[in-house]
């Protein structure tokens, strides 16, 4: 057969195996989508969401823009390998199709220089030859950086990289070997036939024809075998993300989301993680306590590879749920939801847990707003008292929903895996709010706010008190005076990274005080350490994390540390002599 040699067989067989295994896995996962997810796909698949999905696939799967924005060195490394290899295949396919108009087979594009010995005969052929060498050099630069990252990750801006499994390491070295082997193969052929470009011909000229004649076929054979090894291992390792992220982006663009139970969509999320390790450096457990192998990258790896293994339970429990890893994740995997699913405790479920809530009377709330202080606000009563002062200052009629009875929003239960119990509690609270006739719901707790906005289905506006106060000031209903107070502001995890509320608290503070900038704020805000997401850490460990956050807030030497979370306030006020106040308290003092 023309344009064939036995050495191409490993590549061909590996490519076929890759296609078959990936198709089998993807079809199986799609069949595991639940009914609601399938309905969303059918509903939205023809609604013009394909082009935005394709664009995101291009920018993230090939160009890796999210990684680049956070770390340009890592971004270049990933982009040069991913986009460079894609271009090698794409441009190589065009070149080989032009150069081999007859008896073309798909493997010819991969081994084109071996089957096409003719040196470049015209300008078009010369451009292709030089461009392919340039692309190969581009990919090799990324491979070199990956090797540097393995030896000294700090050069690429990472303090710690992921600890990989034996199979992951095997495929990594296989990937690193593909492009040097291609370079040597094409250089040996260039030595014999003069068909190389600026890179391969230069290296080929270093060979003697006798040596090149002996090494040419072994080099091409090793290149083919290495490709085969990479293809065969790919579906069972972290490099499955190469194709899986494409599907994940498409499904997300269609509106598919995960629920409280693992479905086929979760399988796509687990396999879309490349285990890049970007979530490790900024994790408070590693950064402040030196705790490793419980971060999200390891939880996802264990869920994917080990299923019901004790490591899943340990990695799942030991987390602050502060969303810092999700902020760094370049694939935007819903890490917190997956962690909650790993904590599933539905076997402990009981019925009729929260009937006592229906004894609470809220029926006088017609025409009023409902105010939900939250459990932690009862432990920091200055916050709820300040909110009542603000309500009275603007003549706002309100119903203090949890004033005399402790009511939980349900999110702490959800964070710990009590999914069924949290659902029961939400249903009881929803019934209570609907019966009250309240026109809006305002809460002082970011945990409650995230629960009400994301997990409840209420047909009334929901505001965190910083949003509500900002609206009052902006409309002129709430008259405040600006004092001489200098404050720093701590973005609570659940309010900032959890709900994306960064502007409103700052607008309120700027209206009543001088707001000082801190090093770590907004998306990079540090966790207070007392998050309800973790029941494993000791008090000393929580205090260590809290002190790191306090050092950041104290650096500009403020008069007051401001926050918008009762839990954060309670955490900070026990660790500093500087006053710690909620934004509502500062506003109430400046009326």
Image: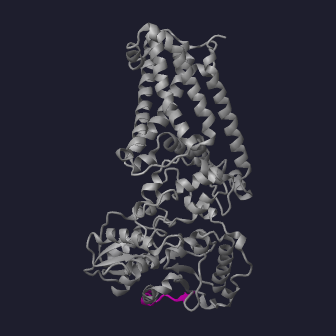
Quadrant containing the N terminus in the rendered view: top right
Label count reads 0
Is 394 inside the magenta-drawn segment? yes
**Of residues 450 and 544, which is closer to you in this image?**
544
Q: Is residue 316 left or right of residue 484?
A: right
**Of residues 357 and 165, which is closer to you in this image?**
165
Instruction: Say which quarter of the image contains residue 381.
Output: bottom left
Looking at the picture, does residue 397 appear above or below residue 170?
below
Q: Is residue 518 left or right of residue 84?
A: left
Q: How is the structure coloured here?
A: one colour
- Name the residue located 71 percent from the left edge and 58 percent from the top edge: 36
Q: Is residue 120 visible?
A: no
The spot of residue 412 in percent (x, y) is 57, 74
Looking at the picture, does residue 442 appear above or below residue 395?
above
Instruction: Say which quarter of the image contains residue 482.
Output: bottom left
Query: What segment is highlighted magenta in the picture?
Result: 390-401
Is 66 inside the magenta-drawn segment? no
Q: Is residue 351 left or right of residue 555?
A: right
The spot of residue 570 in percent (x, y) is 43, 80
- Name the residue located 54 percent from the left edge and 76 percent from the top edge: 448
The spot of residue 361 in percent (x, y) is 64, 91
- Name the residue located 58 percent from the left edge and 81 percent from the top edge: 439
């Amino acid at each position: 057969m023309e344009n064939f040699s036995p050495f191409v067989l490993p590549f061909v067989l590996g490519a076929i195996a890759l296609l078959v295994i990936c198709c089998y896995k993807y079809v199986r996962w799609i069949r595991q989508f639940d009914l609601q997810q399938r309905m969303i796909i059918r509903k939205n698949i023809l609604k013009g969401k394909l082009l935005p999905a394709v664009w995101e696939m291009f920018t993230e799967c090939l160009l890796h823009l999210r990684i680049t924005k956070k770390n340009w060195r890592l971004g270049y490394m990933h982009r040069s390998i991913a986009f460079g290899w894609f271009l090698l295949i794409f441009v190589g396919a065009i070149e080989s199709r032009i150069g081999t108009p007859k008896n073309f087979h798909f493997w010819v594009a991969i081994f084109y220089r071996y089957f096409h010995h003719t040196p470049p005969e015209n300008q078009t052929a010369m451009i292709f030859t030089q461009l392919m060498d340039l692309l190969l050099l581009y990919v090799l630069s990324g491979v070199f950086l990956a090797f540097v990252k393995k030896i000294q990750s700090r050069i690429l801006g990472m303090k710690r990289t992921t600890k990989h499994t034996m199979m992951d390491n095997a495929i990594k070295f296989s990937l690193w070997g593909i492009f040097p082997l291609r370079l040597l193969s094409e250089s040996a052929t260039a030595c014999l036939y003069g068909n190389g470009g600026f890179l391969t011909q230069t290296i080929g000229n270093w060979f003697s024809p006798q040596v090149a004649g002996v090494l040419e076929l072994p080099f091409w054979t090793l290149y083919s075998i290495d490709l085969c090894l990479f293809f065969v291992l790919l579906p069972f390792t972290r490099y499955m993300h190469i194709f899986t992220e494409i599907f994940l982006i498409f499904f997300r663009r269609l509106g598919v989301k995960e629920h409280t139970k693992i479905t086929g969509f979760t399988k796509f999320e687990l396999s879309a993680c490349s285990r890049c390790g970007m979530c490790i450096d900024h994790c408070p457990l590693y950064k402040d306590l030196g705790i490793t192998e419980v971060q999200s990258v390891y939880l996802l790896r264990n869920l994917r590879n080990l299923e019901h293994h004790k490591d899943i339970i340990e990695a799942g429990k030991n987390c602050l749920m502060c969303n810092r890893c999700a902020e760094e994740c370049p694939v935007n995997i819903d890490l917190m939801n997956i962690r909650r699913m790993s904590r599933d405790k539905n076997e402990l479920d009981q019925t009729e847990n929260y009937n006592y809530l229906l004894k609470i009377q809220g029926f006088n709330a017609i025409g009023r707003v409902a105010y939900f202080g939250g459990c932690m606000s009862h432990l920091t009563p200055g916050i709820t008292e300040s909110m009542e002062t603000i309500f009275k200052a603007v003549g706002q009629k309100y119903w203090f929903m949890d004033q005399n009875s402790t009511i939980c929003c349900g999110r702490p239960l959800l964070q710990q895996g009590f999914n069924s119990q949290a659902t029961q509690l939400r249903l009881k609270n929803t019934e209570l709010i609907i019966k009250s006739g309240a026109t809006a719901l305002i809460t002082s707790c970011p945990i409650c706010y995230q629960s009400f906005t994301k997990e409840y289905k209420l047909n009334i506006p929901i505001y965190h008190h910083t949003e509500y106060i900002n609206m009052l000031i902006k409309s002129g209903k709430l008259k405040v005076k600006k004092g001489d107070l200098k404050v720093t502001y701590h973005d609570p995890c659940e309010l900032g990274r959890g709900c994306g509320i960064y502007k409103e608290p700052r607008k309120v503070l700027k209206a009543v005080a001088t707001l000082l900038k801190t090093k770590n704020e907004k998306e990079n805000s540090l966790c207070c350490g007392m998050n309800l997401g973790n029941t494993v850490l000791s008090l000393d460990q929580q205090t260590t994390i809290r002190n790191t956050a306090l050092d950041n807030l104290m650096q500009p030497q403020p008069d007051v540390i401001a926050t918008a979370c009762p839990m954060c306030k309670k955490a900070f006020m026990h660790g500093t002599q500087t006053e710690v106040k909620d934004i509502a308290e500062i506003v109430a003092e400046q009326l």
